[in-house]
Amino acid sequence: MQPNGMIFWDWNGTLMDDVDFTHGCLNWMLESHGYPQRYDLAQYRELFRFPIEDYYRLAGFDFSRHPYPMLAEHFMAHYNAGVDACPVMAHAVDTLTELARRGWKQAVLSASRRDYLIEQVAARGLQGFFTELLGLADIYGVSKVQLGTDYLRRTGIDPAHCVMIGDTQHDAEVAAAIGAKCVLYTGGHQSRALLEAACPHVIDDLALLPDLLESL
């Protein structure tokens, strides 16, 4: 692809490194709600998926005992209390800078609640890279397909000139749904095997992205 198109970045696990923290939050949730099971990081990266409700079910939460909306509230309170310590991903800033230099427009397309997203991007000094910060209206992490679709319709941007960059199978689903190309990054919330099953373009280092985009 030629630069001057639009890149949609996922946020959690792609530009912000909250993987270890979110894994710890899962085990904290299980312990605090009386469940015996605990997961190591590799197991967590096999369980994680969207919608988040499905991930909680796979992790073993019993929604008849603990309804999903209540669990989501408890998770978010615990997560927000510690997320400030989560760093930017390795090579993220250099990659954002290089893509901007090459003429790409960039936006964040996240399943996070938008006000949280804005705070987290600003806290890391990255807001200047993005034309838009697109997030959901709630904390339930269902899907961001409609967000992307509505944005493209509103702006008139050709989806054929767009690329979705993320760390989960859902990012590949979003790309397919909105008509964009996709690149998935292995440093996030899902295993390489899951990503490779969803997308032919998988990278281990964000620094590889600018050159890869020129070959798509």
Image (spheres, grey):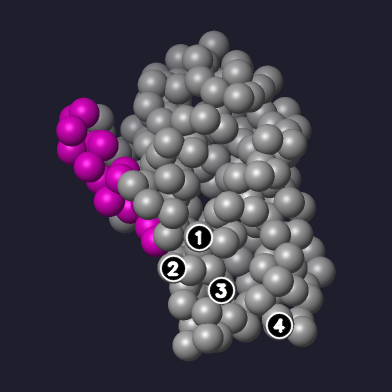
Which of discs 3 and 4 lies nearer the camera? The answer is: 4
Q: Is residue 145 magenta?
A: yes
For label 2, the residue is 69
Disc 2 or 4, which lies upstream in sequence? 4
Residue 163 visible, this angle: no
Q: CA distance from mark 1 to mark 3?
A: 13 Å
Q: CA distance from mark 1 to mark 2?
A: 6 Å
Instruction: Give whichever of 199, 47 is nearer the camera.
Output: 47
Horizontal side of residue 58 vs 112, given as left or right? right
Identify residue type, mark 4: Tyr
- Percent across and percent down for residue 140 are 43, 60
Q: CA distance from mark 2 to mark 4?
A: 18 Å
Task: Magenta stretch: give its range.
Answer: 142-156
Identity of the residue furthest to the right in this view: 40
Identify residue type, mark 3: Tyr
For label 3, the residue is 56
Horizontal side of residue 187 vs 15, given as left or right? right
For label 1, the residue is 73
- Percent across and percent down for residue 117 are 49, 37
Disc 1 or 3, which lies upstream in sequence? 3
Secondary element at image label 1: helix
Q: CA distance from mark 1 to mark 4?
A: 18 Å
Position above or below: 36 against 10: below
For label 4, the residue is 35
